[in-house]
Amino acid sequence: MNVLGIETSCDETAAAVVTDGREILSNEIWSQVEEHRPFGGVVPEVAARSHVVGVDAVIERAMETAGIGFSDLDAVAATGGPGLIGGVLVGVMTAKAMASVLKVPFLGVNHLEAHALTVRLTEGESEEAAAFPYLLLLVSGGHCQLLIVEGIGRYRRLGTTIDDALGEAFDKTAKMLGLGYPGGPRVEEAARRGDPSRFKLPRPLVGRDNCDFSFSGLKTKVRQTIEDLPAGPLRDGDVADICASFQKAATDVLVDKCARAINVFKSRFETGGAMVVAGGVAANMQIRDSIIELARSTDMRFLAPPVALCTDNGAMVAWAGVERLKAGMTDGAGFRPRPRWPLDPDAV
Ligand code: KG4
Ligand code: ZN
């Protein structure tokens, strides 16, 4: 079974072909980073136009690399939300048109579900790997949530951010320090040379008896810390120390909340289970290592996609398509792209 997956919900135009045997036949990404760089962040209108311009060529490349013909596709999947709606529309309309011509099912994939299921593509879905249920920390540019993944389309949200997503806080910190865009990898880079104890930054909501996050106060404190430095250009050492202090504060928050979520998970399920991290921020090595340590100390297996499959890509969409196709959960031409689409509709 071959499924084409199309991702256009943010600033990457991506397409991939994945099989039900977990083979990634192709995984093409055309990044718009250069177009958004002058603005220091993603401009929705610019993104939507770039997806229109780029999507055909990216799909063509994905098919060429996969070495299969269009008639070999069993379904076409596209991110159907949540995301920047102009971009989502481009992917969904393209996928619907292809599915209609090829007479195969169309699948409107939830972008968050695609992140959530990626470990089943990369690790397998056996008892030792990513069998349901598992605990998921989903941390990206738009989301920061703890969820129990019970099955395809079945999620229980334990907590979420009450203000900013962590990736956004990484990006803003980078912007304030003049490190450029996208910020996450640059903050991580600079943090390696810094002293995480030099600046006292807050750990919002740590110690509270819930799984919710808050990062806006941390972001504000980073701004104040920069303003308190002597006037003039920032020194390399100061930038590195701020990045290290910020990253340590963020990591401490994630570890505290994951520990609480593990307790909830264990109280609901007797079997061991896995602690999974996914989303762009899961590419961060300090965050990964700290959660690996937490998993070890709480007898949970740790799983995360390889770094290249943490940030947005087409393979995760194609794989979510494979899983949904196998479960008979296909969509029709009436599927509506959604700017908002929570995984757990019952969560407040
Ligand atoms: O999942 P993703 O590619 O797109 C969304 O769905 O949001 O995540 C992008 C986010 C950005 O905020 C980016 O700065 C962050 O992930 N990110 C990182 C790292 N790599 C990407 N944050 C921290 N450390 C990293 N190494
Ligand atoms: Zn994403």
Image (cartoon, grey):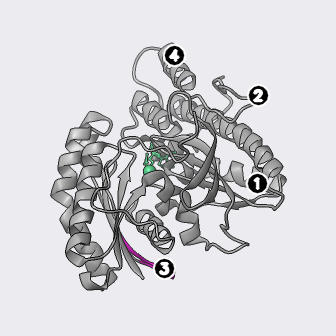
- Which residue lies under the disc numbered 4? 224
Residue 50, placed above or below residue 102: above
- Which residue lies under the disc numbered 2? 207
Query: What is the number of the mark on residue 105?
Result: none
Q: Nearer the viewer, residue 163 or 250?
A: 163
Q: Are marks 1 and 2 in contact (CB under 8 Å)?
A: no
Q: Residue at x 73, y 43 (%)?
A: 261
Q: Nearer the viewer, residue 37 or 18?
A: 18
Quarter assignment of residue 182: top left
Q: Residue at x 70, y 48 (%)?
A: 290
Q: Position of residue 35 (x, y in %)?
A: 22, 45
Is label 1 or label 4 in front?
1
Mark 2, secondary structure of its residue: loop
Q: Amino acid at mark 1?
A: Ala
3D distance between C-alphas at marks 3 and 2: 43 Å
Write the start and end of the magenta stretch as one range: 16-24
- Which residue lies under the disc numbered 3? 20
Check if residue 100 falls in the magenta segment.
no
Mark 4 or mark 2: name the one nearer the start of the chain.
2
Q: Nearer the viewer, residue 260 or 97?
A: 97
Q: Amino acid at mark 3?
A: Asp
Is label 3 or label 4 in front?
3
Q: Are marks 3 and 2 in contact (CB under 8 Å)?
A: no
Q: Residue at x 70, y 50 (%)?
A: 291
3D distance between C-alphas at marks 4 and 2: 24 Å
Horizontally, is 85 left or right of 152 in the view?
A: left
Q: Position of residue 178 (x, y in %)?
A: 38, 32
Whether residue 187 is visible to the viewer of this picture, yes or no, is yes
Horizontally, is 141 left or right of 10 in the view?
A: right
Mark 1 or mark 4: name the one nearer the start of the chain.
4
Query: What is the number of the mark on residue 295?
Result: 1
